[in-house]
Structures are given as C-alpha cells and as structure tokens.
Image (spheres, grey):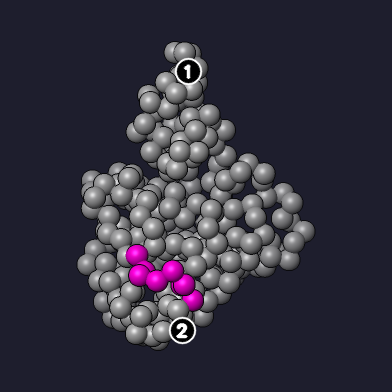
Amino acid sequence: MNDKGGCGKSMTASLLALIYNMEEGRLPNVLEVDQARLANVLGDTVSTITPEINDTEQLATNPDLAEETFNPVYDELVDDDAVVDVGANIATPLIKWADTSDLPELLAKDGVALHFVFPIAPDPETLTAALNNLHAARTVFGDRARYTGVLNDVDRSGFGNFEQQRGWQVLQEKRDAGVQLRQLPNCTCRIADLARKQGMLPPQAIDHFDDLAQKLGLNPPARRQQWNKLTRWHDNARRQLQDLAPGCEAAQ
C-alpha cells in the first residue's frame, strides 16, 4: 500500500498473486480496493471494492461509510490466502478502519498473518507516503504483521539522489528496526515501455508480446532480444518478491 499513485502497487500485487499461483497451482483471493486493473492480468476471479464517493477523505471521517466499504476486506482475509491491492489515498482510511474495528485482534484470533508491502518509486512524495503508511500500520498492528518496502525504479531515474534525504535515512532506520527492504530491477525493454504506455501491467506485456512486437515493427532478432530482456526482468522481480507472497515465510 501507498497513498501516492504511480509507484507500482498493482504491479507488485499482480506479481505476488502470480508467484503464489506458481507455488500452489492456483490463485489466492485477490481483492482490489479502488480502481479495477488486476482482472486484466489475473482474470475475473478478482474481487473489487470501489468506494461510491470521489472524496476518499470521507472514508477517514465517516465510520459508517468506512465500515460499509472495508468490511469485505476481512471476509477475503479469513476465507483464504489473499492479496489485497489498496489504491491511492485508500491506505490511510483503511488503516484507521482497521484500528476502530479491532481488526488486529480479530485476525490474530482467526490465525491470519498479515504482511504489509509498501511500493516506493524514485519520488520523494511516494517515499513520504510509504513512511506515513508504514508508521500508521505498525502503530495499529505492531508485531502482529510483517512489513516490507519495495523500491520500484519505475522511471529508471534510480534512488541514488535519495541517499542524502531525511526520508531515505528514516527508511534505513526502519530497516534496522526489522522492516524488510527489496528492490525490483530496472526493466530496460521497449516492449515493457509500450505496454506501460497502453496502460498494461508488466505481466501483461508477456501475454501480449507478439502484438506489442508487431506494433514496434521488430524483426526476429529484435524480438528475441526483447523477449529475453522482458522474461529476465520478470524472473528477477519474482525472485525479489518470492518470500513476500501469501503463505511464504521470510528468509531468516
């Protein structure tokens, strides 16, 4: 989760669901809280909660509305292993609802182990939002959950310029305090770039590779090169996220 958009939340969620599918031979429960994107990758088994209001601040100030909107999250979590993709500006009211509904105690009683994943792009606003959401989640769930930040270099600008910023230093302090940190590899692939421009998630680029390659006018050697780059990125990203998928334990 991250209240800032454009940091790779849906991409990360889709990869986690696909990793689970590779391990278990089936998809976990997948729930999107906000706009529907994952169904394009994972099929019509994805459930979606779309708030009926445009002003998400009302979810944080109206307990009845938050209860009506977020209660289905509990049902998905206790029913089976699950991946929940929380949209932009939804994390803060969702965590507040979790606190007021005693969700940590209920899930602990039901034997549900939570793992919060916070994608972070090379943008100070996404870093600040992730840190704020991380602090809020840890305040509410404490040691009942695991927490991981996923650095996602979406625009290939890198994270080098972050090292002197206070937010980056705080993130490293959180890491020393038990928060995991992973970094997804860059995807320097023309196919992925075109897929992104067309509103696709990276896993969809593999499914639509032939159509995308045709649009780019790639000859057979160029197709092979782009296929190798795309699948190599996908394999490396999976390895980074492998133990973050539902039911997987972190390497000790």
Which residue is at a point 42% across and 63% down the rendered structure image?
86
Q: Where is residue 92 in the image (x, y as percent from the top left)?
A: 49, 74
Q: Element at badge 1? A: loop
Nearest the viewer among 235 and 88 is 88
Nearest the viewer among 73 and 242 is 73
> Is residue 47 visible from the viewing direction of this image?
yes
Q: In this view, does 164 lie to the left or right of 191?
A: right
Nearest the viewer among 29 and 114 is 29
Q: Where is residue 112 in the image (x, y as percent from the top left)?
A: 31, 71
Q: Is residue 136 above or below residue 246?
A: below
Q: Are marks 2 and 1 in contact (CB under 8 Å)?
A: no
Cα separation between marks 2 and 1: 52 Å
Identify the mark at residue 75; answer none if there is no mark: none
Q: Element at badge 2? A: helix
Range shown magenta: 50-57
Q: Mark 2 points at which residue?
A: 61
**Dot 2 or dot 1, earlier in sequence:** 2
Which residue is at a point 52% across and 35% down the rendered structure image?
193
Q: Name the residue under label 1.
A: 217
Q: Choose top left, top right, bottom left or bottom right for residue 149.
A: bottom right
Q: Choose top left, top right, bottom left or bottom right for residue 29.
A: bottom left
Q: Choose top left, top right, bottom left or bottom right for residue 227.
A: top left
